[in-house]
Image (cartoon, rainbow, N blue to C red):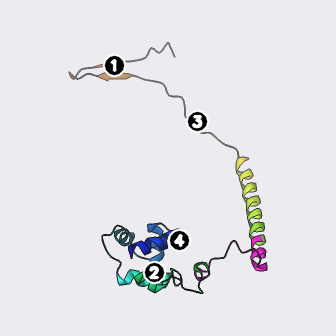
Amino acid sequence: MKDRIRQIMEHENLTPAKFADKLQISRAVISHILNGRNNPSLDVVLKILSQMDYINPEWLLTGKGSMYIKGKDEKSSIGEPDLFRQNDVNATHDTRQNEELTESAAKSTFSDEQQTVNKAITAHLRPEKKIDRIIIYYDDNTYETFIPDKMKN
């Protein structure tokens, strides 16, 4: 069954982490199943079948039949639009609306960036610091103090 679960993940383009998140189970559970440490529990199988109702339960349990239920398409069950559907008038209309929205968002972002660039930059300068003295400590517990010559500054 682990190979069939891996096959589902490959067909759905899901990483083990995303697959676990989709099923709302621990990522470790999927990791253990894929590594062969544990067999899938009934809970995992039920979550796969409830979240992906287009998966054929007989195929998942026994490997017989096809992966998908006949008459069901994995994309239509999820509710995701088919991006390659060009003949549908609504799909073409939605694509045009999305393009217009993207263009207006890009123009808005560009004008916001121009406003940001035109802002003046003010620098906060610190007052100049001068060395007052340098103290060097030696490992025999003695030290020397050096005071810079006031005439050089």
Query: Viewer-nearest of labels 3 and 4?
Result: 4
| Residue situated in front as seen by the camera: 58 or 13 | 58
Q: What element carries label 2?
A: helix
Image point (58%, 83%), residue name: 77
Q: Rounded to the nearest whole Å, what is the CA distance between mark 1 and mark 2?
A: 77 Å
The circle drawn on residue 125 is: 3
Q: Name the residue under label 2.
A: 48
Q: Looking at the picture, does residue 50 appear above or below residue 108?
A: below
Q: Where is residue 146 in the image (x, y as percent from the top left)?
A: 37, 17
Q: Rounded to the nearest whole Å, what is the CA distance between mark 3 and mark 1?
A: 30 Å
Q: What residue type is labelled 2?
A: Ile
Q: Residues within 10 Å of mark 1 (few under 14, many from 20)?
A: few
Q: Mark 4 points at which residue?
A: 11
Q: Position of residue 148 (x, y in %)?
A: 43, 17
Evaluate if marks 1 and 2 touch, with contact meaning CB atoms under 8 Å apart: no
Q: What residue type is labelled 1?
A: Thr
Image point (32%, 22%), residue name: 136
Image point (50%, 28%), residue name: 129
Query: Viewer-nearest of labels 4 and 2?
Result: 4
Q: Rounded to the nearest whole Å, what is the CA distance between mark 4 and mark 1?
A: 75 Å
First to last magenta residue range:
76-95
Q: Is mark 1 on a helix, strand or loop?
A: strand
Q: Rounded to the nearest whole Å, what is the CA distance between mark 2 and mark 3?
A: 62 Å
